Amino acid sequence: VYLVERSRFPRPRLGESLTPGVLPLLDVSGARGAIEAAGFPAVEAIDVDWEATRERRAGDDGPMGLLVDRGRFDAILLRHAEDAGVHVLQPASALDPQEDDRGWTIPVDRRSCRLELRARFLVEARGRSPDRGRLRPSGPGTLALYAYWRGRNLPRRPRIQAGRDAWYWGVPLPDGHYNTLVFVDKEAFQADRYTSVDAHFRQILRDSDLLRGYADLELASPVRAVDATPYLAEDRVGASSIRVGDAALAVDPISSSGVQKAIQTALSGAVVVNTLLRDPASRDLATSFYRDSLERAGAQHGAWASGHYARAADRWGTPFWRDRADVHMRLEA
């Protein structure tokens, strides 16, 4: 097995707040012990301002997840893969793969030289890649604007808040930085041609409580914008290729379970790949299982997200919230 990774590690990455379901999944792959040994802090409670009243929610059965440095988290998983026998090419860029009757040829750029990998099976795990495959949106177009801050006495708990035309997520990180995310309508943002990403972010953030009351704040990163629209890939599995993670399924960010779902698709995808390589007669059964399980997962997450958005729609009643509350019913129709 070869793993081609474009970035040097540690790399910055969103998804620093992990749901409780991540650790049991890592247990299956044998990586749980290394992640627990890293000492990432547990989420004991979350400050919520979503409906009519503000509240502090704590887990009924223990911590509500982990706050991780994704640079360290991803590097630990990469080392675990190497220990399992995976050949890692890093930094390297996989170019357009081509399939013929002998399998796959994947051109790879590595340290200013070109090499070719030959493979029986291709796994697409490059995250959101709109340049490849057909992606079926499963929710309204959403952008996440985000930036990291440093300062004295920043919040120690995650915060989530619903605003009039956006929602906000604040994540304290193990290194003392604070990540603020603003989720906005993609079309509305693109229509605002006269506002920079930085200005738009700061303007909307002022309407939230994420940083209100905290002194001596300093921006510790550029303001960035990433697509956060949920979708499902149509070509998520074939006889000799499979998509996992965000390359296959991207769930609505309100669930905060993108990392968990990526690991789930990787584990189930590994079972499917093993079946396709060792038992070709079961190809139809294996591919149907994977396609259908991701279809169901996308529908379940969509229903959960629309219900959560409906509660904010009752509070605000704006098109931003109504569109997100109604999306599941429209998709079903």
Image (tube, rainbow, N blue to C red):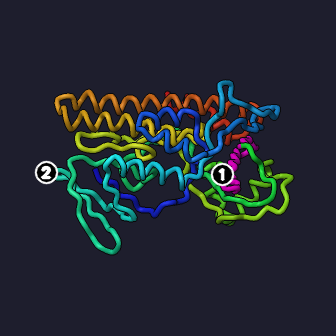
Q: Which mark is residue 102?
A: 2
Other-residue count near label 1 (Cα within 10 Å), few / some / many at <14 / 14–19 / ≥20: some
- Asked if residue 321 lies left or right of residue 25, the reply is right
What main secondary structure does the magenta stretch of the protein show? strand
What percent of the width, then of the height, locates residue 43? 67, 39
Quarter holding residue 13: bottom right
Nearer to me, 202 or 245: 245
Task: Write the residue at 69% across / 46% down.
Answer: 169
Which residue lies at the image location 63% right of the left edge and 38% below the top edge? 323
Residue mark closest to the camera, 2 vs 1? 1
Counting from the top left corner in percent of width and height, residue 121 is at 24, 46
x%, y% of residue 318?
72, 40
Q: Tell me where the magenta segment starts and ends, as one range.
A: 158-182
Q: Residue at x 41, y 52 (%)?
A: 126
* Three-letter code, disc 1: Pro
- Residue at figure coordinates x 24%, y 30% from the top left: 284
Mark 2–mark 1 contact, CB under 8 Å? no
Residue 174 image label: 1
Q: Tag 2's secondary structure?
A: loop
Mark 1 element type: loop
Whole-angstrom CA distance, mark 2 to mark 1, is 48 Å
Which is nearer the eye, 75 or 92? 75
Residue type, label 2: Arg
Going by the image, does 313 lie left or right of 93?
right
Is 99 covered by the magenta stretch? no
Residue farthest toward the left in the current orientation of the protein: 101
